[in-house]
Every structure is written in C-alpha cells, then in structure tokens.
Amino acid sequence: MDRLNADLLPGERLLWSGSPKRIPLLAKADVILVPAVLFFGLAVFFGVRNGFSLFLWLVLVLVAVAFFARPALRYAALRTVSYGITDRRVVVWTRGKQSASRYLKDLGPPYVRENPDGTGTVGFNLGRKDIGPVTGLEDSLAAVGLEPKHPELLNIEHPTVVRDLIASAQREAR
C-alpha cells in the first residue's frame, strides 16, 4: 500500500487496490492452441511412422515452443501486476512500478465479465456511443505485445463492487 501511495499525484486519493486473484494459464485468445495441439499430435504420430528428418523435428519443436510460451509468459507477467483506482485515475503497476495510467474522465463506462468462481474482469468501453464491451481489438493488441488503449483489471475479487466504485469516481471526476 505504501508503494502504491508513493506513485499518486499530489492531492490524489487511493480508493481501491488489488491484484489478479485467479491467473488462468489459458485465455480465450489461446483458442488457436487446440488446432495446434492436434496438428502437432498428428505430425508426431506420422513422423514416428515415417521417420522425420532432424530438420523437420527442429521446426516442429520451435513452432510448439512459440505457441506454448505465450500462455506461460502471460501467467508470469500477471503474477507481478497490481491495480489501483484513485479519485482521478486507473493505475496498473507491474513489478512494483507504474506501467499504465488512464484518467477516469478519458475512459468509457466500465463493464464486468464475471467468472463462475466470483472473480471477474473490469474493462472500459471505448466511448459513450459504444453499446457493448470492445474486447476483440484489445485482445489482438495485447496478443502482439502492444498495450491496449484502455486498461483492464483482470480476474479481481468483487468486480461489480469495483465497477460501481469506478462509475461513481467517474461521475465525480467529470
């Protein structure tokens, strides 16, 4: 909490802080892993039957590492993330350092995607004209290593309470 307060702007109050409580190894964006596993399973099966060359085995191993490294890297990164909601901003800290910050007045209305275990993700619509949450673009940007335009508070406890806190702080900030 002291480290989080040290990054606040003068006069800014920390309303909530938290971190992901559930860090899944696989996400919806990893659906490509299913056909990849089937492909590699068939490649190994037929490779054993027909005697693959060393070069083809090396290519298969490199492609498999590329597919399976992404979820592992995401898991490792999320273990070091913490979030903060202030009366002015949404702040994301990674490895104890502020890595992203957005002013509440610049964010669209918050939304919640709940998980069956009670945790959930709080995200932000792109603007007032948007009807539903925009997640495809955000997932695509995050998949290629670019930061999404709006922060998401992934897999936090009591996401509806946090969403309501953000909405209240947005009303006061405008």
Image: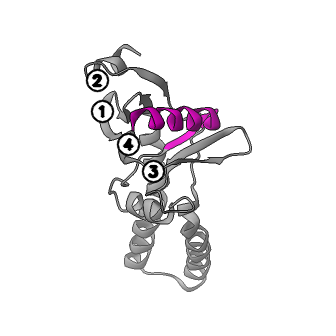
Quarter containing the N terminus: top left
Marks 1 and 2, how far apart at CA: 7 Å
| Amino acid bearing label 2 | Asp
Whether residues under marks 4 and 3 lie with C-beta atoms below 8 angstroms apart, the answer is no
Give yes or no for residue 79 being in the magenta stretch. no
| Amino acid bearing label 4 | Lys
Check the image and name the residue furthest to the left. 10
Q: Residue at x 45, y 50 (%)?
A: 108
Circle 4 — which element? helix
Task: From this view, report whether residue 65 is shown above or below residue 24.
Answer: below
Binning the other alpha carbons within 10 Å of mark 4 as few (below 14), some (14 to 19) or many (20 upward) gives some
Marks 3 and 1, how far apart at CA: 22 Å
Using the image, tell me which numbered label, if any, was put on residue 108.
3
Whether residues under marks 3 and 1 lie with C-beta atoms below 8 angstroms apart, the answer is no
Mark positioned earlier in the residue sequence (4 or 2) = 2
| Amino acid bearing label 1 | Gln
Mark positioned earlier in the residue sequence (1 or 4) = 1
Q: Dot 1 corresponds to which residue?
A: 98
Task: From this view, report whether residue 149 is shown above or below residue 33.
Answer: above
Circle 2 — which element? loop
Camera-side mark, 3 or 1: 3
Magenta part of the chain: 153-174
Q: Dot 2 corresponds to which residue?
A: 7
Whether residues under marks 1 and 2 lie with C-beta atoms below 8 angstroms apart, the answer is yes
Q: Dot 4 corresponds to which residue?
A: 105
Marks 4 and 3, how far apart at CA: 8 Å
Task: From this view, report whether residue 97 is shown above or below residue 120.
Answer: above
Marks 4 and 2, how far apart at CA: 19 Å
Q: Residue at x 52, y 33 (%)?
A: 168
